[in-house]
Image: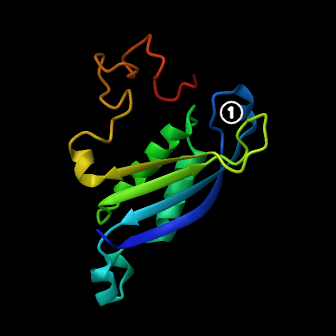
């Protein structure tokens, strides 16, 4: 797919990180999303319904960043990529999460993680489910797993 829609520099405050102070105080995260899709139908019709409404997608991506905290920006990037692929026209999503205030004791320009996810690969299991998605006792970390450390809503 040669066509792309890019949303770069989307900034939102989240409470992600492995340290307690990151969870408590929060920090800004910056998201770049590049969506691969066929834009020819939208160009021909001049109708937003034939493409990705990047304003609405931005709202959903901000909701992910400001939502449930995770330890790693790798996990956050995965969640954001899933949100991008929930758009029916998107065949591939490249998502970069920047953590400009990462707790590093040295001067640095940027810390970022980029994930690339394809809809076709997701159908083969490349997009992994999260613990608890099955809602079953056999699902580690699921709601019926009383000792599961990955239960939804629990901060570890």
Occupied quadrant, residue 154? top right
**Residue ID at (39%, 79%):** 48
Q: In which quarter of the image is the C terminus?
A: top right
Q: Is residue 86 visible?
A: no
Q: Which of 13 and 114 is in front in this view?
A: 114
Q: In this view, does 92 lie above or below 100?
A: below
Q: In which quarter of the image is the N terminus?
A: bottom left
Image coordinates of residue 108 in percent, x first then y, are: 73, 45
Q: Give the image's coloring scheme.
A: rainbow
Image coordinates of residue 62 in percent, x first then y, are: 57, 55
**Residue ID at (27%, 46%):** 122
Q: Is residue 44 above or below residue 23?
A: below
**Residue ID at (46%, 22%):** 150
Occupied quadrant, residue 46? bottom left
Q: Name the residue under label 1.
A: 23
Please give the count of numbered marks on the rendered protein: 1
Q: Can residue 58 be seen in this view?
A: yes
Image coordinates of residue 58 in percent, x first then y, are: 52, 62
Q: In this view, does 51 lie above or below 122?
A: below
Q: Is residue 69 above or below residue 41?
A: above
**Residue ID at (29%, 22%):** 136
Q: How crowded is mark 1: few (under 14 residues within 10 Å), some or many (20 or more)?
A: some
Occupied quadrant, residue 40? bottom left
Q: Residue furthest top?
A: 147
Image coordinates of residue 113 in percent, x first then y, are: 53, 45
Q: Is residue 144 left or right of residue 124?
A: right
Q: In this view, does 3 lie to the left or right of 77?
A: left
**Label 1: element kind:** helix
Q: In this view, does 88 lie to the left or right of 48?
A: left
């Amino acid at each position: 797919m040669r066509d792309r829609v890019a949303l770069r520099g989307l900034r939102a405050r989240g409470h992600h990180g492995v340290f307690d102070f990151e969870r408590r105080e929060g920090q800004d995260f910056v998201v770049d999303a590049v969506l691969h899709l066929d834009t020819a139908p939208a160009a021909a019709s001049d109708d937003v319904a034939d493409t990705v409404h990047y304003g609405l997608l931005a709202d959903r991506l901000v909701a992910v960043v400001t939502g449930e905290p995770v330890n790693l920006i790798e996990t956050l990037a995965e969640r954001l990529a899933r949100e991008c692929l929930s758009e029916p026209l998107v065949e591939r999503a490249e998502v970069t999460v920047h953590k400009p205030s990462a707790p590093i004791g040295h001067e640095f320009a940027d810390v970022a993680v980029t994930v690339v996810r394809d809809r076709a690969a997701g159908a083969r299991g490349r997009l992994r489910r999260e613990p608890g998605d099955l809602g079953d006792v056999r699902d580690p970390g699921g709601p019926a797993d009383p000792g599961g450390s990955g239960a939804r809503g629990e901060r570890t």
